[in-house]
Amino acid sequence: MAAGDDTGQRKGRFAPYGLLSPGIIWLVLFFLVPMWTLLRIALSHKPNPYLPNYVFSWRWSNFSDAVDRFRPELLRSFEYAAIATVLCILIGYPLAYYIAVKSGRWKNLLLGLVIVPFFTSFLIRTIAWQTILGSNGFIVTSIHDLHLTGLSDAIGLTTRGAILNTPQAVIGGLTYNFIPFMILPIYVSLEKIDPALLEAARDLYSTPARAFWRVVLPLSLPGVFAGTLLTFIPAAGDFINAELLGNTNTRMIGTTVSQLFLAESDYPTAAALSFIFMAIITIAVLIYAKVLGTDELST
Amino acid sequence: MRAVHWVTRHLLGFYTFLAFVWLFAPIFVIIAFSFNKPKGKFNTVWQQFTLENWAHPFARRDYTQALFTSLKVALVSCIIATIMGSLLALALSRYKFRGSGLVNILIVLPLTTPEIVLGASLFTLFFDRNYTLGFTTVVIAHIMFCVSFVALTVKARIRGFDWTLEDAALDLGSPPLRTFRTVTFPLILPGVLAAALLSFALSIDDYIITSFVAGDSVTTFPMQIYGSTKTEIPPQVHVIATALLFVSVILITIGTLRGLAKERA
């Protein structure tokens, strides 16, 4: 940090470690140590199928067994999360763009309005979607009254005339519940763009569309990148949407892990499955970072 | 031709309007259904208007109790996490020291770990050490995921802060504690308050991690709701949600207005 000296940043010998220690100790004890415990259990086996106890035994086969057993749930989780993330970009980008560039003095108000819905509880919002998407809800009854069930089935909005308890509802719920994490980073990156750059593009006879593609979009990619991580990771691990808006065929990995731990007490399988899930996410994130060419993970 | 032009110019605005309708649709449903008189146990189909739910918002003892448990958990973990997180942010932005990169990574890691993995790993830790699940374990977990949010929020707010102001105070003979109280603290306070609000909101709304570490003796508000969605959804849920929404909107509005007033002054 070159500017460090200008702002009076100090070289500390003991003081910084004193300030850090409570938080760091907490994160080590309740984040790193639990991860270590989880890894050890993932390599253990259960001597007695009726007891939750386990014995460490370097059992690497737990990982392949877990993948074999829960492949559909794993694939489904990443599929739903990926579709929801794309939808979040498609809905969130224009919205963030409008607020950052076009809204003038209404900017702060609109930005506030984006966040307000998320001050109600996650669960209650999702229950409200049950009401909206249910067979007595406005959308489904309208489709039925207009005799458009065939059309809405064909375009994939409904499945046999229903929305609730279908994959569409789960993906819709994921999109809705995680979209602020997409809108806000994109907004921040758009807001940072110097208007002089756009003026320069205009002076050089660029059309507005071309200026957008060549100037605005590339500069906003870090926001899209951050937003994608912040929506994809929690969406893939979520099970509330799948449980409240889906059916037994839309079950995601979160439900499986939770049941293995809390209902079946099969800790080694559950731990192995958690690690596989995390490993896939990490690989996906690294590939995505490579493709997008964003090296500034920290910004 | 002119009509086409008008449409393209207002297309983005119209799209934004539709997006806002979508964002607020469930909120209107929650508010409307807090005035609904449900037939049966599920407040999910509109029947008729009533003020009865608002007259008896605490009619359901179990839900009220769960709400108070949640408020208690949120308050305790918010205070502890805000203190620890702010100290982390202060150390990182004020000092140059060995290992600051590692500290940064340790702070970001919990945020990029899926909640089920965080919950599962804490569950295994407590099981492994024979630690009884309950209020304490819930608070421990909530502090863990709030600390990182607080540290990042406060750090972002005090980036570029001019630490020579502190030196000036010290040079003028102000003792260190007094310098902190009269110079440093007022400057970092807005960031700290924003972080505290955020961690309170995160804590009170968490279900996934809490479900792993709560055991049978503690029921938070989200656990109470989730646990009974298959058997009932009483209208009090909608009333409490609406009330909480209004309280937070008012708090945020006051905060924003005060911030704006300060900027103008």
Image (cartoon, coloured by chain):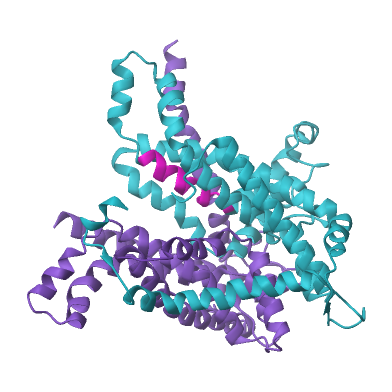
Q: Is residue A78 left or right of residue B176?
A: right
Magenta stretch contains residue B169: no
**Residue placed at 78% from the left, 46% from the top?**
A162
Q: Position of residue B156 (x, y in %)?
A: 36, 58
Toward which corner of the image does residue A275 lie, by quadrant?
A: bottom right
Magenta stretch contains residue A181: yes
**Between A8 and A92, which is closer to the camera in this rendering?**
A8
**Residue placed at 85% from the left, 60% from the top?**
A66
**Residue placed at 46% from the left, 62% from the top?**
B104
Q: How many marks?
A: 0
| Residue B232 visible | no
Toward which corner of the image does residue A11 lie, by quadrant?
A: bottom left
Q: Which stretch is magenta? A: A178-191
Where is the N terminus of chain B found, in terms of image quarters? Answer: top left
Q: Residue furthest left?
A: B172
Q: Position of residue B113 (x, y in %)?
A: 61, 61
Q: Is residue A66 above or below residue B234?
A: above
**Residue placed at 48% from the left, 63% from the top?**
B102
Magenta: main secondary structure? helix
Chain in cyan, by letter, is A
Where is the C terminus of chain B found, in terms of image quarters? Answer: bottom left
Q: Position of residue B257 (x, y in %)?
A: 26, 59
Q: Is residue B79 left or right of residue B159?
A: right
| Residue A5 visible | yes
Q: Residue furthest top?
A: B1
**Between B203 and A273, which is closer to the camera in this rendering?**
A273
Chain in purple, by letter, is B
